[in-house]
């Protein structure tokens, strides 16, 4: 039992978010806010919706607008379809914004200017709004009008130059990591702006660029270049500044060895049956091991190949040496630790069938968490949202639908 009471409502209860972003970075931010209890309304184009709805297979069986990609970043939202480029749609959009605390958008700069939806124009009409704009390169600089795609930004930001085998071509990260990181930065900025608004009383414009977020997230590697001036080379599955800290082959598999300090180095060598290596003065410190990487890594590699993965797990666990076996998703989602943390959850599709989703990593003790809900079908809550927030009746919504506005 925790030593403090539990708030019966989630932390962001009462905060309303209009998520007008597409694909991943903005929707991922919206999902995080929904996980914290915000009411998130996903604004989509009539008849088409978010691009990722069609990025299958796989899809939820029987529902072609619910791809796995879409499921990954739209949990806990309601879907409203609205053509904001039309006169009536634009008017409804501003009426909705007047009822919202936060807008998430990734409009192209020229499109936003044409529609009068640039951050300055939005805040002029809605002075308490938190307007979070996500783009490839931000609202300033020579590339402000250029489109931004995760893969391209991984290339431009230097991330690919440090990813992949030492001998071979640059690689991208296995997921759209720049989009995910930008979504995390966006959620952080939105929460800060909401807190600031409670003090100042006015809204804020947030300008987030995928390129900026990608560069900032390269932390120690990018900083090493600024500090030392040397362009870092790809290390494959090794670490630029720690040795041995990389993937090694065992006698029957693969294992990541994470020797993070000198005590762990000595413990590893003892567990490997090579205490003399741990006692060697030329390898005593991490700095020495980095400088003698070409000597140390082959020695460790030879030791690792003497035993199978299971034997290494036992030895390294007993020696308190950090390590990990490379696992597949089948292993991960069957892991008792994954299940204990709620990282696989089950919701129901529109037909009532169970659908497994990735869970939220947010565990806030002392506050209730919202019940997870299925990502919405396209426009499933259009009538409800327009009725609840704008007071439009069924006939009015039907007329808008006939004209293609919703």
Image: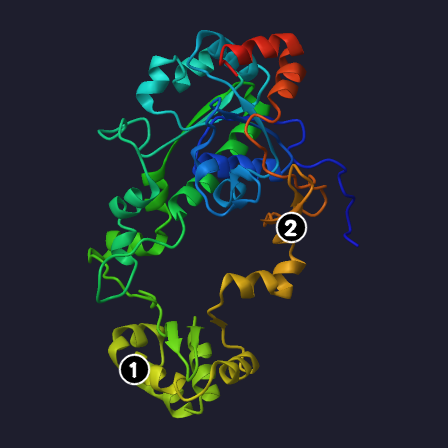
Local packing at callout 2 (Cα closer than 10 Å; few below 14, some 14-19, many 20+) is: some
Q: How far apart are marks 1 and 2 (CA)?
A: 43 Å
Q: Are marks 1 and 2 in contact (CB under 8 Å)?
A: no
Picture coordinates of residue 364, whole percent (x, y): 66, 46
- Nearer the observer, 178 or 394: 394
Residue under the point 55% across and 66% down: 331
Q: Which residue is labeled 2 in the image?
A: 345
Q: Quadrant of residue 229?
A: bottom left
Q: In this view, does 272 lie above or below 191?
A: below
Outermost residue on the front side: it is: 62
Q: Where is residue 250 in the image (x, y as percent from the top left)?
A: 41, 81
Residue 206 place in picture, x, y as percent? 43, 28
Q: Name the residue under label 1.
A: 298
Q: Which residue is drawn at 77% across and 47% down?
A: 4
Please give the name of the residue rendered at 57% of the width and 44% of the height, measured from the top-left corner.
61
Which of the two discs, 1 and 2, labels the residue nearer the N terminus?
1
Label 1: element kind: helix
Residue 391 in view of the camera: no
> Which circle, 1 or 2, is nearer the viewer?
2
Judging depth in this view, the residue of 195 and 355 nearest the camera is: 355
Vertically, is 42 above or below 159?
above
């Amino acid at each position: 039992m925790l030593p403090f009471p539990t708030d019966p409502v989630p932390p962001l209860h009462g905060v309303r978010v209009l998520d007008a972003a597409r694909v991943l970075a903005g929707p991922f931010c919206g999902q995080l806010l929904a996980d914290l209890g915000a009411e998130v309304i996903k604004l989509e184009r009539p008849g088409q919706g978010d691009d990722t709805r069609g990025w299958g297979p796989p899809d939820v069986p029987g529902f072609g607008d619910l791809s796995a990609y879409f499921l990954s970043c739209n949990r806990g939202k309601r879907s409203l379809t609205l053509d904001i480029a039309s006169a009536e749609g634009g008017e409804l959009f501003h009426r909705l914004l007047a009822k919202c605390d936060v807008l998430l958008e990734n409009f192209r700069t020229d499109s936003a200017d044409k529609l009068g939806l640039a951050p300055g124009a939005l805040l002029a009409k809605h002075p308490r709004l938190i307007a979070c704009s996500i783009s490839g390169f931000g609202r300033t600089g020579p590339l402000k009008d250029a489109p931004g795609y995760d893969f391209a930004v991984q290339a431009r930001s230097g991330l690919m130059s440090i990813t992949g085998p030492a001998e071979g071509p640059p690689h991208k990260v296995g997921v759209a990591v720049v989009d995910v990181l930008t979504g995390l930065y966006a959620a952080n900025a939105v929460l800060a702006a909401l807190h600031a608004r409670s003090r100042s009383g006015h809204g804020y414009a947030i300008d987030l660029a995928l390129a900026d977020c990608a560069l900032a997230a390269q932390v120690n590697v990018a900083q090493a270049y600024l500090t030392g001036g040397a362009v870092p080379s790809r290390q494959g599955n090794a670490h630029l500044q720690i040795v041995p800290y990389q993937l090694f082959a065992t006698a029957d598999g693969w294992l990541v060895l994470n020797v993070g300090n000198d005590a762990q180095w000595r413990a590893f060598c003892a567990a490997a049956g090579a205490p003399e290596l741990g006692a060697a003065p030329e390898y005593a410190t991490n700095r020495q091991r980095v400088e003698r990487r070409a000597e140390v890594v082959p020695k460790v590699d030879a030791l690792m190949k003497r035993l199978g993965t299971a034997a290494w797990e036992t030895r390294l666990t007993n020696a308190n040496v950090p390590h990990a076996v490379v696992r597949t998703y089948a292993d991960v989602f069957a892991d008792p630790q994954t299940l204990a943390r709620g990282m696989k959850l089950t919701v129901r599709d529109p037909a009532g069938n169970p659908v497994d989703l990735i869970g939220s990593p947010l565990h806030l003790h002392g506050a209730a968490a919202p019940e997870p809900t299925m990502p919405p079908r396209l426009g499933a809550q259009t009538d409800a949202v327009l009725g609840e927030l704008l007071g439009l009746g069924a006939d009015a919504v039907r007329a808008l639908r006939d004209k293609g506005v919703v």
